[in-house]
Image: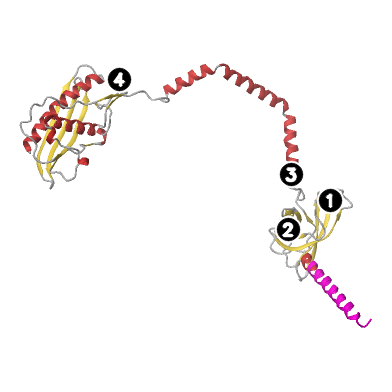
Amino acid sequence: METRAPFVVVGAFVLATIVAVFGFVYWLHNTGGLGPRTSYHVQFDGSVPGLLIGAGVLFNGIRVGEVTDLGLAPDSPRRVNATISVATSTPVRADTKVGLEFQGLTGVPVIALEGGMQLANSGPVPTLIADPGAGQSMTQAARDALRKVDSVLNENSEPLKETIANLKVFSEGLARNTGKIDSILAGVEKMTGGGTPAQKITYDLRAPQNLGPAAKTLKGQLAVPEPTAVAMLETQRFLFSPAKDYPGFADAIWADAIPKLLQARLIEGFENYDVAHAPLRVADLGQTDFQLLIDVRRYRIATDSGPVAEIGLSARIVDKNGKVVASRLFEDSEKFDKVEPPAAVSAFNEAFGRIAKEMISWTVQAL
């Protein structure tokens, strides 16, 4: 007996210690602390699924106490009465809002308190009334919503049937008249300028031919940069003075923008004169001895006194130091009978041919 007594005492002490620790943890968890407590009565008008004695009480999301009592109201079968114990420092007022929240993956219910507008306590807090439907879970809310939708559908079943029938008639009508609808849409698309754009007719400028044998060759390396022009002339469209739309010109364009077209045909004209010493574009060369700088002043069809193709170019020859060697203004025009693209292009070719011959001859003599 004397040898067994110490083991019994030790075992009893260990068991008492374990029970005390578990009891302390349980008490600390359910009371939320060691401070003074205050009890309040809470009334729910409806079910409180899953709420148990010992469930937590949160105030603005912070745990402040627990549920200490829970039961059915004897005077109302729909009401649930609860008693909560919270820290005395919790600012519970008469206008404090009460609800039920479900936390975690398992949806553990807790009572949630939310502070009202009263800053100071004006007396004993009466029974706190929970918000209507506070205990309603998400599943129950979804079921109630579906019941309302089902009720609306049942009340409007006939109008819905009529609407579906009208849609069926409308779709059948569209199917029967698909060809007509396509024709109407094609007409609207054409009227508004949509659809596939009309094919443009491209016209080119002709370089001067038959310039005869080169009596004098170009001295030094000459370059012809792209001519400068105002923004209005940076186009492929035919320009008119005064500006006006003429039939046939909406679909007619030059082969390139006017300055680039003049540059290409003028260089081709120099090649027809003396291909061995013909100038090139600046982009094709490095440092050159001379440059022929051209500014496009006019390239239009004047219609005031009959259709006339007018071309005006100013030219300067500068050396590699930027010094102007020579300068001259070249202008020419050619009348034509009918305002139509082929006749206008022929007139431009005649006028440009004469200007190009004069400019080539002048350039050769200046150098």
Type of amino acid at the residue the image marks with label 3: Ala
Q: Is mark 3 in CB contact (under 8 Å) with mark 2? A: no
Type of amino acid at the residue the image marks with label 2: Leu
Q: Which residue is mark 2?
A: 113
Inspect the magenta stretch and tell me whether residue 17 lies in it: yes
Badge 2 or badge 4: first in the primary sequence: 2
State how far apart marks 2 and 1 are (Cα): 19 Å
Mark 2 residue crowding within 10 angstroms, few (<14) / some (14–19) / many (20+): many
Name the mark on residue 141.
3
Mark 4 residue crowding within 10 angstroms, few (<14) / some (14–19) / many (20+): few
Image location of residue 76, percent across then percent down: 87, 49
Name the image quarter holding the N terminus. Answer: bottom right
State how far apart marks 3 and 2 are (Cα): 21 Å
Q: Which residue is mark 1?
A: 79
Image location of residue 3, percent across then percent down: 91, 82
Q: Which residue is mark 4?
A: 248
Q: Is residue 232 visible?
A: yes
Main SS, magenta region, reads helix
Mark 1 residue crowding within 10 angstroms, few (<14) / some (14–19) / many (20+): some
Which secondary structure, mark 3? helix
Q: Nearer the viewer, mark 2 or mark 4?
A: 4
Residue positioned most to the bottom: 2
Q: Residue at x 72, y 36 (%)?
A: 149
Type of amino acid at the residue the image marks with label 1: Arg
Inspect the magenta stretch and tell me whether residue 50 lies in it: no
